[in-house]
Image: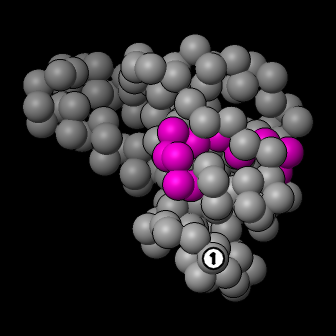
Amino acid sequence: MRVFFDSSAFVKRYVREEGTDVVLSWCDQATELCLSGIALPEIVSAFCRLLREDLVSPVQYRHLKTMLMADISDAAICDLTPEVIRHSIISLEKNVLRGMDAIHLGSALALKVDLFVSADARQCDAATQAGLRVVQV
């Protein structure tokens, strides 16, 4: 099963918070992890914020980043293609979304995933409207 995670969901794989167990379960069930290319800088940005706020040490930060890079080594990473942009624009016109959220959704549609996982309620609603099977974490 091809499971797409937006940044708000995939970061829960590394930072324990509400929804972490659900994300870990879907990661275990996935035959392929799918992400938008924008997820990587967004997740590293979250790690950097934790470091700046002294919620993780420099050693923990490096460990988080190393785990992320290892996890994505065989993931399907969707580039910003004309198809992704087209799906993103359609999603923006039909829903109340931020631009980056629309890119996540456009990426999932371009990858033809089996499941879309997000912590963002509006994004989940838009994904459902677009015909995706959705799990909100």
List x then y, in percent, for residue 85: 63, 81
Vertical side of 97 occupied by 69: above or below: above
The front one of 8 and 82 is 8
36 is higher (above) or lower (below) than 9: below
What's drawn in magenta, residue-wise? Answer: 113-123
**Furthest residue in direction left, as rendered:** 53
Q: Is residue 114 left or right of residue 27?
A: right
Whether residue 74 can be seen here:
no
Q: Secondary structure at mark 1?
A: helix
Q: Is residue 56 magenta?
A: no
Q: Position of residue 39 (x, y in %)?
A: 50, 52
**Which residue shows up at 29% across the image and 19% down it?**
60
Name the quadrant containing residue 81: bottom right
Q: In the picture, which quadrant includes the C terminus?
A: top right
Q: Considering only vertical position in the picture, is 117 above or below 16?
A: below
- Please name the residue shown 73% across and 43% down the image: 134
Residue 61 rendering spot, x and y as whole percentages: 29, 28
The image shows residue 2, relative to residue 30, as above or below, that is below
Q: Nearer the viewer, residue 25 or 121?
A: 121
Q: Which residue is mark 1?
A: 94
